[in-house]
Amino acid sequence: MPSAKRQRKREGRQYRQAQVKAAQKRRAQRRNAIRIAVAAALVLAVLASLGKFRSKKSTKVSTKTTTTLASTPTTAVAAAFGTTACPAADASGARVTTFKDSFQRCIDPAKHYTATINFDAGPMTVQLAADQSPVTVNNFVALARSHFYDGVVCHRVVKGFVDQCGDPQGTGSGGPGYTIAEEPPKSGKYAVGQLAMAKTGAPHSTGSQFFIIVGDQGAALPPQYSYVGTVTAGLDVAKKIEADGADADPNPPKVVHKMVSVTIAES
């Protein structure tokens, strides 16, 4: 049998070995904890960076108004009247081109409205669809009675597509200082000889720009633009303007035509 002294030495060695192993285990656990913490910090940093990128990307909206939708809106906004006082029904006021808000209800739901757009190429008559698009037609009528459209050019004219007018800047990015929501055609489609409002790819972005559909490409546009009305006389004028237009987007028209005035009749 081992002596008591040898037994104590053996137990001492075992104890020290156990202590060394325990210390090694604690150091290994600390290293693992540090690795996990560093990895977690890196993951959080990457996620934060991605979040900032997505936030910036999602809030960037083009200000250019076109008749070609950049993306399909996911949230519809109901069209509503605004707070700006109505101009004189006889259009006797001075010309105004900038407003703080869209207009109050200026049209009578019981009446019919016709617009005569006097281009430098000749007059065009449009039966306005107040029954289908009351806010849109109200906006068009109020702008016309404010002489907003007087002298404004048709900045975008593409053969077989549309004649687009109504930007006081003549660049395609201007408007009246406010926007309204859309009232697409109830039929779900367009036709040659109809007027609709231009907009950006975002909902609630209709302003003052409108387009006359002069070709099959325009008639094939998705029903996401407010329906204004239908040409009842003077479609040949729109065709004259189209003939001076560009062969393809985004080229400017060969000859820039303009509106001399827009007058409104009610019955």
Image (cartoon, grey):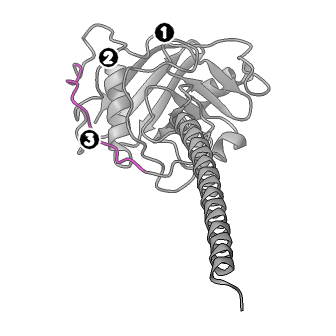
Mark 1 / mark 3, whichever is N-terminal: 3
Q: Residues within 10 Å of mark 1 (few under 14, many from 20)?
A: some
Q: Amino acid at mark 3?
A: Lys
List the single residue furthest toward the right.
247
Q: Position of residue 249 (x, y in %)?
A: 74, 27
Assess whether residue 137 is covered by the magenta stretch.
Answer: no
SS for dot 3 = loop
Q: Residue at x 48, y 13 (%)?
A: 168
In the rendered view, tell whether residue 95 sits above or below residue 21.
above
Residue 113 falls in image quadrant: top left
| Residue at 49% over, 26% down | 209
How many angstroms separate mark 2 from mark 3 (CA)? Answer: 20 Å
Above or below, comparing residue 43 to residue 199 in the picture: below
* Figure quadrant of the C terminus: top left
Q: Which mark is residue 111?
A: 3
Side of 208 where 233 appears, left or right: right
Q: Is residue 17 left or right of residue 183?
A: right
Q: Residues within 10 Å of mark 3 (few under 14, many from 20)?
A: few
Q: Position of residue 49 (x, y in %)?
A: 58, 38
Magenta span of residues: 76-87
Camera sees residue 190? no
CB atoms of marks 1 and 3 within 8 Å = no
| Amino acid at circle 2 | Ser
Q: Which residue is mark 1?
A: 151
**What residue sits right under mark 2 in the picture?**
146
CA distance for labels 1 and 2: 13 Å
Regarding residue 55, the answer to whether it shows in the image is: yes
